[in-house]
Amino acid sequence: MDLSKTGLIMVISGPSGAGKTTVITDVMKTIPGMKFSVSATTRPPRYHEADGISYYFISQTDFDELIEKDELLEWAEYAGNRYGTPIAPVLQSIKNGEVIVLDIDVQGALAVKQRCPDAIMVFISPSDPAESERRLRYRNTESEDKILARLEIARKESAYIGEYDYLVINDIFSEAVRCLSSIVIAEQCKIKKNISEATQC
């Protein structure tokens, strides 16, 4: 066993407006070899998003083909659009000893947990659900119908927090960053973690 290798799959979920991406991005500044998995999606890009970096923006037909070829680690429908995680880049990152982060919804997260039981499951959320709504509205990127749909999804997903290994409360940003950093470091230091285990999915 190569003791320099500490590859991990880290699955992170939470309600829209929880600040997941901002927290993860800040943690990545201090932990080498930690990066986002790039998901495929059928939704159109937002003005600041780039294909292949933010997401792989693909057609419904191309998404169907990925499913048929079993080339997705997980996939789910969320607010009328489909999202999925290409499996090959994830497994390559694990072999490279990287911490690959899947920022996905609960439905997709549970699918990953079933297929990859060694994946680290983290739920990020503000302590008050009203704060997620405030952040969503401040973002001003979606219609009222979309916002209400996301809030309803968040309400339903909160029932699955018990399926996760860790809960990070994002009320104070610096504290949330500290907590997530500590989780990553602790998991990297676990004796049982090694490449052969991590690539069983």
Image (cartoon, rainbow, N blue to C red):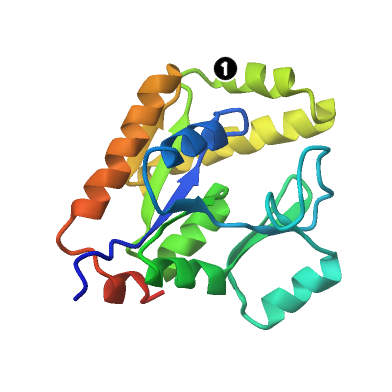
* Residue 156 appears left or right of 55: left
* Residue 71 appears left or right of 34: right
Percent across and percent down for residue 60 are: 83, 66
Q: Which of 31 and 186 is in front in this view?
A: 31
The vertical placement of 36 against 170, above or below, is below
Tell me the quarter of the picture where residue 107 sits: bottom right
Tell me the quarter of the picture where residue 47 sits: top right
Residue farthest left in this picture: 191
Please give the count of numbered marks on the rendered protein. 1
Visible in this render: residue 158?
A: no
Percent across and percent down for residue 181 are: 33, 37
Q: Which of 55 and 75 is in front in this view?
A: 55
Q: How crowded is mark 1: few (under 14 residues within 10 Å), some or many (20 or more)?
A: some
Q: Nearer the viewer, residue 142 or 96?
A: 96
The vertical placement of 124 against 103, above or below, is above
Badge 1 element: helix
Percent across and percent down for residue 171 are: 45, 18
**Which corner quadrant holds the N terminus?**
bottom left
Residue under the point 36% across and 44% down: 31
Amino acid carrying mark 1 in the image: Glu
Task: Read off the residue under disc 1.
Answer: 131
The vertical placement of 94 against 105, above or below, is below
Residue under the point 28% across and 61% down: 6
Percent across and percent down for residue 52 are: 71, 58
* Residue 43 appears left or right of 173: right
